Structures are given as structure tokens and as C-alpha cells.
Amino acid sequence: MTTADDHAAFAAKREALHARISSRHSQVAREVQALEDLDRQLAAAAGPQKETVETLRTSLELVSGDVEAARVRFDEARKSQSLAESKITELTELKEALSERLIQILENNESAKIKKLDELQSQLDQVPATSIPPASTCAHSRAAAPPPRRVDSPSEETFAGFDLPAIASAAGEVGMPTQSSSTGGD
């Protein structure tokens, strides 16, 4: 009988195990049902918030892209502005340098004119009134004398672009003393 007792003991253990598994299975099923109910309640409570959160996340991503694009445009504009400012500064400095050079040339030209007028005035003051030929003779001589030639590059022998030796020779032809003749005799 050991086999029948063993068999009965085995069947009893098996029934106990089966009852225990069945009990645990029903307990697990109740816990699964409770968890599903809890998930549904959480989903119902978070539903409107979830949609709002998703909408805000989408909007945030779009705005972040817009901000980055605006930042790139701003950086490009800043670089362009910086280049434009440096170009303005460079051109302003060039303009000032050219203006200073022009003023210097004009002042030198005016000084030279004044100096030449003073020289001509002193030469005229040194000429006696009786040595000046009559106007009719001067007009005839001037018409015969070639006009002073224009010189492109100024030198010591030029004044305001005119050739001074040519002017002096023309003055000598009309009976006026030249600079060399008036200063040579002194």
C-alpha cells in the first residue's frame, strides 16, 4: 500500500497545489483588474492635461526653431552692420584726408597768388610812369605776342598752371620790365 498511500498523498498535494495556484491566479486577476482601473482613472484625469502638454510641447518646438532662425538672421545683420560701419569709417577717413589735402592745396595756391601779386605790385611800383608805352602800342604788341602756354605740372617757373618765363617774355615784348631785368640791375 505504499504505492496507494503515496499516490493518495501525491494527489492530495497536487490538489492543494492546484487550489493554491487557482487562489493565486484569482488574486493576480483581481490585482490586474485593479491596475487597469487605476490606469483608466489616471488617463481620464490626465487626458485634458495631456493634450495641453502635447500642444505646448509642439508650440515650444516651433517657437524654438523660430528663435534659432531669428538669432541666425540677427548675427548676419550684426556682421553686416559691423562691415558697413567699418566701411563708413574708412570712407570718412579718406574723405577727411582728401579734404585736408584740398584745403592745403588751395591755401598754398592762394599764398602763391598773393605772393605773386605782391611781386607784380612791387615791380609795377618800380616802373616809372613815363616808361610805360601808350595803350595803342601795348594793344598792338599784345596781339602780336603769343598767348602764355598752360603747363600741366607746376614747378618753380609756373604759377597757377601758366609758364612764367613765357609771360615774362610777353611782358618784355610790350615794353614792361621782366623779373630778370628788374632784379638783375639791382
Image (cartoon, helix red, strand yellow):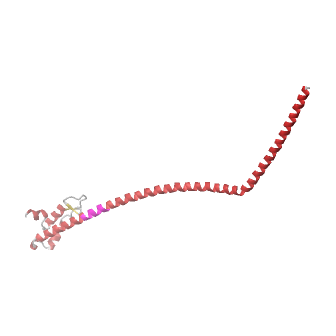
User: Quarter of the image holding residue 139?
Assistant: bottom left
Q: Residue at x 71, y 58 (%)?
A: 48
Residue 160 location (% of width, % of height): 23, 63
Q: Nearer the viewer, residue 90 or 22?
A: 22
Decide: is 68 above or below 182: above
Please tell me whether residue 100 belongs to the stretch shown in magenta.
yes
Lateral position of residue 135 relative to residue 15, left or right:
left
- Magenta highlight range: 99-107
Lateral position of residue 99 relative to residue 143, left or right:
right
Decide: is 28 above or below 170: above
Residue 134 location (% of width, % of height): 13, 73
Decide: is 76 above or below 135: above
Please state, as top left, top right, bottom left or bottom right, where the N terminus lies in the image: top right
Residue 166 location (% of width, % of height): 18, 62
Q: Nearer the viewer, residue 23 or 152?
A: 23
Q: Residue at x 84, y 39 (%)?
A: 20
Q: Residue at x 63, y 56 (%)?
A: 59
Residue 57 location (% of width, % of height): 64, 54
User: Quarter of the image holding residue 91?
Assistant: bottom left
Q: Nearer the viewer, residue 155 or 140?
A: 155
